Image: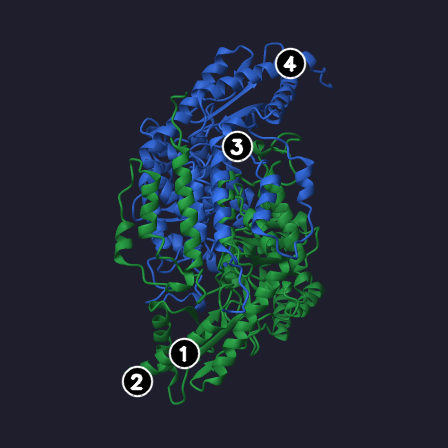
Chain colours: A green, B blue
Amino acid sequence: MSTEQTLDPKDWAELRRLGHRMVDDALDYLEHVRERPVWKPVPDSLKQAMRAPLPMEPTDAALVYEEFRRDVFQHNMGNIHPRFWGWVIGTGTGFGALADLMASTMNPNIGGGDQGPNYVELQTLSWLKEMVGFPAEASGLLVSGGSMANLVGIAVARNAKAPSDVAQQGLQGATRRMVLYASSETHNSVHKAMSLLGLGRDAIRSIPVDSEYRIQVPELRRAIAADRAAGLHPFCVVGNAGTVNTGAIDPLPELADLCQSEDLWFHVDGAFGALAKIAPELRPLVRGMERADSLAFDLHKWLYVNYEVGCALVRWPEKHRATFVSPADYLAHLSRGMPAGPIWFSEFGVQLSRGFRALKVWMSIKENGVKNYGRLVAQNCDQAKYLAGLVEKEPELQMMAPVPLNIACFRFAPQGLDDSSADRINEEILYGLQESGTAVPSSTMLRGRFSLRVCICNHRTRREDLDLLVREVLERGRAAIGTAEVPAP
Amino acid sequence: MSTEQTLDPKDWAELRRLGHRMVDDALDYLEHVRERPVWKPVPDSLKQAMRAPLPMEPTDAALVYEEFRRDVFQHNMGNIHPRFWGWVIGTGTGFGALADLMASTMNPNIGGGDQGPNYVELQTLSWLKEMVGFPAEASGLLVSGGSMANLVGIAVARNAKAPSDVAQQGLQGATRRMVLYASSETHNSVHKAMSLLGLGRDAIRSIPVDSEYRIQVPELRRAIAADRAAGLHPFCVVGNAGTVNTGAIDPLPELADLCQSEDLWFHVDGAFGALAKIAPELRPLVRGMERADSLAFDLHKWLYVNYEVGCALVRWPEKHRATFVSPADYLAHLSRGMPAGPIWFSEFGVQLSRGFRALKVWMSIKENGVKNYGRLVAQNCDQAKYLAGLVEKEPELQMMAPVPLNIACFRFAPQGLDDSSADRINEEILYGLQESGTAVPSSTMLRGRFSLRVCICNHRTRREDLDLLVREVLERGRAAIGTAEVPAP
């Protein structure tokens, strides 16, 4: 018997009992989620509980769990609820959560090496490539999400297309300014990536969109030509497979052609839209995506996998690796033992230490099968169209954008209500829906107007939930008109 | 009853039974880890299993779990084992894994908003600041690990110290080259960050170290002066609180003074060493760390929390936020409802979608208490010194570096064995230790020689494990001499 200390429990049977209780609570929580409010404001009691002094002494695990149950468990974001449709946020599954338990139990570091989890990630990546139509020879990496996947893609683009060795020499001596092109509807993670990569947000040409919020290719051509004429260095076009605001899909085949003829890197941000590929009826919408040099998409959105997991794919493995590899003596790739193995994922992204996020993806794809996922993706799109149909039947409601995928943007705008009053009333409707726990849409500005935005990445949503939403929006809007003050001039 | 499809199970009771089984398996696995080999090479059967075709149809969850148990569970990296001491890799705990189950069940996105998990992260960050001696007003962010935390710190440094608005304008027009200083022992994630940020690896001045592998401050001063004289723009010094190779700690107070007088950003990479701060007897070693402008450290290493979680702290919240904020209509901070709330973490790092990694940290700190963690950190350092003592008693073994913290580097080098034969034999010893499942040290090059490297971030290690290691190294080394071929000239 060692006198040395450990964090292992003194009584494993006790931890086991606690674990069973946690599984019961977790599955009860998910089974009955529909019966609870989607969201409620965080109460002062929780805010107070989260100002506790630093715990110096240990507390029994069961008591810690009780504090979690009392203070945290009931005050969730709500995205697991059938009527959560805010931003682009997925739902997760019970089996996915259990997969995370096993991943966290094994607790490996998938930087690389000869270990089972490494092979699970390779298998998962190979499935994902097939699902989105990328060649098996492409390189890939599971990442924290779309923001990181976009960063990876654009970083490889920068290094691959720069006239000099950017990894080594940086951009500080660059004489010809590198420029990237993307529609005005492009996600802000692209702007963040450009900022971080030292290219600067000014190096993004924001190209206007058409009435369906798709990039205008003639404008894009003109911008490229103008930049070349001005001595700049166009290097990348970002195409959107599902914009965040409205789900618009840029004309990807045209962008692919243009990139080919102009020698530009073609990066596709398919954060959620890339998964349209697995629904046979939607597949034509994202045609051309498979021609991208790099593709970013999430699995915690439209594959309904638990947070956090996205994927970056790059058609050119050597360019991908060259962007991130950074050799070190303590990471020597030895020929045998633990440091051998098929791949060092750490050479393909920012992280050296990497958790086993692959497991929940691997187990979930097996559990559900791709056909089911495809049906659910299509179901969410049908639901968004169903909602648009409901909206169009109501004269007091107005659709604010087409519904190419799973996003419907609309607002309460009865005749005679001026635009700025309507802005204010729709904001009020949004707050009311959320604060009453009825539903959580988010909002955005479209054509300069405040719009309710319903994005369905939710395997629990039913049409009846959308019926309820429309009823509630109408009721709240009408009540607000009744009580609305005259807006200040 | 809806006819719409869902990923929820048809039979929740069945998933519950499976969940109980998974908890049992997980805790059995941890309870009995000492009885199993640390690691074994991945067998062909697993490699074969991970070349399966894309699953189109669903599979019963229990069967998927069986496949996991059969193919994956037994082929782990091994870092949960008491005799795993490779690289700098933590151990995790059973309660931490169960916390991950609950986090994944709640499945929130902690980009921001008014939700309980957001407050849990704020509470956790406030504890972490106190633990490492940072002011409460500092900003912080839980990230994937040290690589990302270093990237965050250096990105803020770049933007804060640049003469122009780098986020907007980039580095492409920069006239005065920005330069960063760090010892030659600095972790390669700093090189990766410099490459990614567009500064380039050439903009790192690699400053030589003394015999204890600490940065030579007079050399650093000379380099800064020379660069200033050459018209360059020094902007940042990276200090190490625990280098990856040997655990060396740079003279942090001197670096802090120097940065203050030279107007340089002081970033500290405390990946594991920062946690020395919580052990009273080690605290003096990292004095000066609390004066850093930014600090990177991991919780999945020396706080033994399950993967993946690290922390970036920045003394200047506005500079931190300015580096990463990227406004967008669909992310408007409304005054009420879900999008209200105390903070948007997404404005302080790369990720917009962020999982609930805070929960396992919060629950683990409560469960174990900081004093216990401090004792374990000190215990690991004592163990490394104990190992050094064993090595020094054996004339055939040689210590390769001092042992300031939890890392001991040594090699089998009996008199009369030439250096390159010793390199080869030590490599052979390493393979033998790993392949037999006895222990997993890693290796590095020190003074040009192949060294075994034992880094103890392990709450399960006992002194008897280190006794065994030394016995095994001696036996394997002696056997190898007996059979060693004469090296090719």
Residue found 70% across the figure and 55% down from its top = A135
Q: Secondary structure at mark 4?
A: helix
Residue beneath label 2, please?
A482
Residue that appears at 37% across and 86% down: A417
SS class of the residue under badge 3? loop
Residue in the picture at 42% in, 42% down: A19
Q: Amino acid at mark 1?
A: Arg
| In the image, residue A272 above or below residue B364 | below
Q: CA distance from mark 4 to mark 1?
A: 81 Å
Mark 1 vs mark 3, foreground winner is 1
Q: Earlier in the sequence, mark 2 or mark 1?
A: 1
The residue marked by circle 4 belongs to what chain? B
Q: Is A437 drawn above or below residue A319 in the view shown? A: below
Q: Mark 4 vs mark 3: which is more N-terminal?
A: 3
Q: Which residue is mark 3?
A: B87
Query: Label 1 crowding class (10 Å Cα cut-off): few <14, some 14-19, many 20+?
Result: few
Three-letter residue code for mark 3? Trp
Which residue, as the protein is rendered here, is positioned at the far bottom? A416
Which residue is tagged 4?
A: B479
The Cα atoms of the two marked residues, 4 and 3, are separated by 26 Å
